[in-house]
Image (cartoon, rainbow, N blue to C red):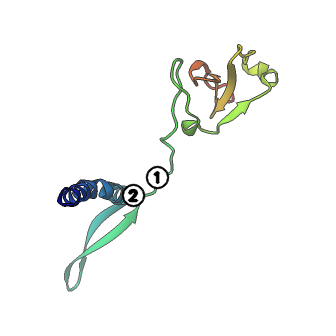
């Protein structure tokens, strides 16, 4: 019985810091989105320090990638992601028939030839949709 209690106590001590990690990560993310600035203003009665809180939001403009041949395509980082089902409609934009196991994908203004199973990029036509 004594060994069981000691084992339970040791497990609870070791599991305590692990359970606290997500909360600290959440606090860190909240602090990253808020920028504090201090402004000093002079008034007739003397100097007054004013703390102003400025909130900075991430507009996700820098989350998009420039794709290169051989990279793994992840649609979460694609801007304006769309699958191109009818490549014939875009012949004027130099799209060609995809080989077996590949399909065309639109990411922003780029046309990307992606493997269906592995997600590897075989070709990138930059600026195809300008």
Quadrant where the C terminus sits is top right
Tell me, yes or no, whether the two marked residues, 1 and 2, touch with CB atoms within 8 Å. Answer: yes
Q: Residue at x 20, y 86 (%)?
A: 45
Element carrying mark 1: loop
Residue 78 is left or right of residue 100, and the answer is: left
Between 19 and 110, the one lying in front of the other is 19
- What residue is disc 2 on? 33
Dot 1 crowding, Cα within 10 Å, few <14, some 14–19, many 20+: few
CA distance for labels 1 and 2: 7 Å
Displayed quadrant of residue 97 = top right
Image: 111 above or below 80:
above
Image: 42 above or below 119:
below
Image: 12 above or below 79:
below
Q: Residue at x 63, y 26 (%)?
A: 127
Q: Residue at x 64, y 39 (%)?
A: 80
- What residue is disc 1 on? 58
Instruction: Return the x and y of residue 44 as percentages of the image width and height.
Output: 23, 84
Image: 122 above or below 44:
above
Displayed quadrant of residue 82 = top right
Q: Residue furthest bottom?
A: 45
Quadrant where the N terminus sits is bottom left
Residue 47 is left or right of residue 111, and the answer is: left
Dot 2 crowding, Cα within 10 Å, few <14, some 14–19, many 20+: few
Query: Which callout, 1 or 2, points at the residue further toward the start of the chain?
Result: 2
Q: How many marks?
A: 2
Q: Residue furthest front?
A: 1
Element carrying mark 2: loop
Instruction: Return the x and y of residue 113 as percentages of the image width and height.
Output: 64, 21
Between 22 and 109, the one lying in front of the other is 22
């Amino acid at each position: 019985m004594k060994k069981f209690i000691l084992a339970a106590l040791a497990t609870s001590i070791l599991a305590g810091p692990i359970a606290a990690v997500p909360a600290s990560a959440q606090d860190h993310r909240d602090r990253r989105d808020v920028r504090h600035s201090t402004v000093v203003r002079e008034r007739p009665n003397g100097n007054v320090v004013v703390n102003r809180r400025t909130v900075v939001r991430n507009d996700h403009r820098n989350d998009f990638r420039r794709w290169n041949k051989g990279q793994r395509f992840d649609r979460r980082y694609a801007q304006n992601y769309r699958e191109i089902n009818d490549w014939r409609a875009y012949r004027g934009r130099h799209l060609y028939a995809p080989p077996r196991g590949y399909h065309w994908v639109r990411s922003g203004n780029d046309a990307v030839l992606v493997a269906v199973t592995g997600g590897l990029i075989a070709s990138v036509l930059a600026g195809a949709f300008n």
